[in-house]
Image (cartoon, rainbow, N blue to C red):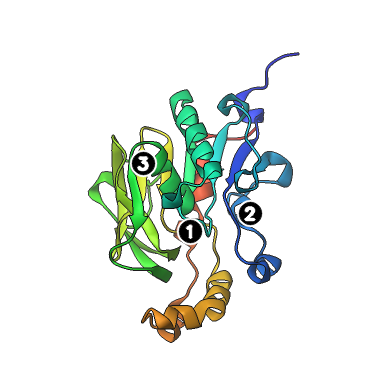
Amino acid sequence: MTAATPSALPVLILHTGDPDETLKSQFGGYAEQLLRAAGLPPGGAEIVAVYEGQRPQAPSCYRAALITGSPAMVSDKEPWSEEAAAWLRDAMAAGLPMFGVCYGHQLLAHALGGKVGYNPAGREVGTQTVELLPTATGDTLMAGVPSTFPAQMLHAQTVLELPPGAAVLARSDLDEHQMIRIGRNVFSTQFHPEFGPDFIIAHLERYGRRYAAENLDVPGLTANVRATPVAGGLLRRFLETYAPGA
């Protein structure tokens, strides 16, 4: 039997959690949303629910890895999360292209030597503006991306300290580490490329009372929700650039 070529290998979706059942029934789980945003057919990815105790194969079995968001907190260092972090360290050493989103962004940073915790600036929710930094100039993935663009946010924790060798590519008003690159082919975003405006509006409706208690302007946040095509295209761009399929 001959070994599979890299382009024939599946993409790993490291599934770290899901929205509540009401939102999941409407929009699908976080792995499904990531799958759609990345333009992957169901057979083109292997979804591994690490938060349910599943374990991925060796990094060499995949052409890339995408890491989902989660309602869990990286700073809790739950056993399944720490096991996933160890796998990410092995994958980084093996040179596997990876893209982490929200929890995945934080988990990559934590796994590779950074620090994660609650954002001192507070919770960031809704459609917010992302600003590219000079470090993004010349980056292959960011070629042609406008200097500012809207993106969907939904997080309370953040990357407080970067892992060694990481470069910050983008920021927002409440988060200095909205997008980072580690090495040549590992990227992560605090914002959610996979979320559409309908999901964010439904989330704000469901959790509006909680957010109002935190003095967030829920009506204003809801009115500001809009489409985010630039952010939404990053997962496809990443795979096309660093892990093209057959």
Residue 141 lies, in percent from the top left, at 41, 43
Residue 78 lies, in percent from the top left, at 51, 47
Image quarter of the N terminus: top right
Determine crowd level at label 1: few under 14, some 14-19, many 20+ residues with C-alpha closer than 10 A.
Answer: many
Residue that numbered label 1 is attached to? 192
Q: Amino acid at mark 3?
A: Arg
Mark nearer the N terminus (2 vs 3): 2
**Residue ID at (58%, 49%):** 38
Q: Amino acid at mark 2?
A: Arg
Residue lying at the far right of the rendered structure: 1
Report if the CB atoms under discs 1 and 3 are less than 8 Å apart.
no
Question: Vertical placement of 3 versus 178: above or below?
Answer: above
**Residue ID at (47%, 65%):** 228
Q: Is residue 137 something one can see in this rendering?
A: no
Q: Amino acid at mark 1?
A: His
Residue that numbered label 3 is attached to? 181
**Callout count:** 3
Indicate the secondary structure of the residue bearing disc 2.
Answer: helix
Question: Vertical placement of 188 versus 155: above or below?
Answer: above
Front residue of 169/205: it is 205
Residue that numbered label 2 is attached to? 36
Distance from Cα at disc 2 to Cα at disc 3: 23 Å
Image quarter of the C terminus: top right
Indicate the secondary structure of the residue bearing disc 3.
Answer: strand
Front residue of 203/140: it is 203
